[in-house]
Image (spheres, grey):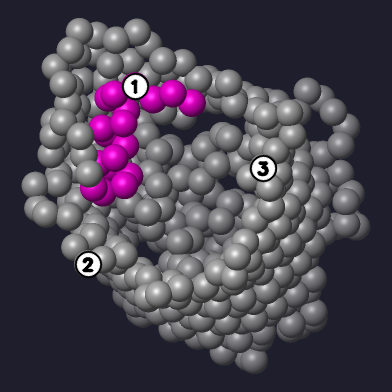
Amino acid sequence: MKKIAMSIVTSSMLFAGGDIPPVEVSEPAQAEFWGQIGFAYQFQDENHKIDGDFGDKENNAFSTTIVLGVQKELGNGFGLTAEVSGWSDFGLDIANNPRVDSSDATSAEITQAYLSYATDSFAVKAGRQALPASISPWAWTDTTAGVADWTYDGVTVANTDLADTTLVAAWISATSRDSSERAVISDDAGLFMLAAINKSFSDTVISLNGYYIPESELNILTGYTTQIADTWSVWGSVVTKTGDIDLGIQGAFVDGDVDGWDSTYGVAIKAGTSWGDLYTELRAGYINDGDYRLAMAGAGTGVEDSSFWTDIYDISGDTYGAEQWSIQARVKYSLQNGSSLYGAIGYWDFDDHPKWGDEDNAWTMHAGYKFKIFDTNAKLEYRYRNFEYYHSADRERQRVRIEAYYKF
């Protein structure tokens, strides 16, 4: 997809953190349009609410999707971006749930609509926008078949006056399609973020993020009730490369003013290397038995919204209230034409979970194939999760996901 000058400048500041080209004062350019069509289908074991066997349509999820967007440089550093996304199951009798993060099988929404302004060292975006995990690990946007699972209303400001450093400030509010699942950010109070991304050292990226969420809507594990409280969080990471080895360390901390609640913190490390087209990585993590989530969304969204490094199957972010250790291995093999095979396997050990009891453990795995056919990006993925002593019995969950989308 071709990018106009305005979007290149803004994206390089807000999403890459370096080497920002100057903005040339110019006459307004022609609008740049883009689009995408696709589908996402998932079949799985019974969930917490519906009994059924693996692949029964009561548990399946399916959506066809379409995304249409436009960017226009308005001149003198100003720009406009808008995007509309829609999804539908077309009444096909193969699933009872939408695969897109929504309670509606057929619907549409404005996923992005913002004004931007940029100079050689400053950029601002105001309106509905996506946030990448590289900038905001605790409030970020993922996609399903090209449709943003959720975006945010607010203002994001970036500055690069400091050498090799991008400073970011943001105020955002949640725009989830199902606010009952969001369960963290109050649309009225919003979330405040300050971030710094530094690349002063060779092959090294240092990131630090601070968050404050007044009037957070927090789900209490016992009874699934909701409590309103002020919450704050700090996330930091260092990622570097030494020879052929990639190394990283990450820390996360969440606290609030709920009486009787303990703060939650986590530490994760990773190391990886390549052998030709094969990349392998080992990760390990620890999360204490605090009462706050390291994930922004409530359980049950089906969207993996925790940027804690050891979360590969909706586990680390939402198993709050239990001390946990985890280790996992990942692998990716790059094939021709941009396709790849990938997989991961992980093990979690939980201690004294408030709902599941003592000595819980879980192991998960996934394997997938990403490929392109007729200029269409596609993905086929299998996931497996096994909790032992979950509800006093072994609990297995399987998912198969199929996604494909075509950009134009």
Within-10-Å neighbours for mark 1: few <14, some 14–19, many 20+:
some
User: Tag 1: residue type?
Assistant: Ile
Marker disc for residue 367? none
x then y, percent, for residue 377: 66, 37
Indicate yes or no whether the magenta region holds residue 211. no
Residue drawn at point x = 60 percent, y = 77 percent: 328
For the record, the magenta segment spans 1-18
Give coordinates of residue 233: x percent, y percent: 30, 65
| Residue with the mark numbered 1 | 4
Front residue of 86/143: it is 143
* Within-10-Å neighbours for mark 2: few <14, some 14–19, many 20+: few
On the rendered structure, is 266 left or right of 399? left
Q: Amino acid at mark 3?
A: Asn
Residue at image coords 45%, 75%: 245
* Residue 337: mark: 3
Q: Is residue 128 above or below residue 215?
A: above
| Sequence-wise first label, 3 or 2 | 2
Location of mark 2 (residue): 201
**Disc 2 residue type (three-letter):** Phe
Q: Quadrant of the C terminus?
A: top right
- Mark 3: secondary structure: helix
Q: Is residue 361 left or right of residue 274?
A: right
Question: With respect to residue 266, does 38 lie above or below?
Answer: above
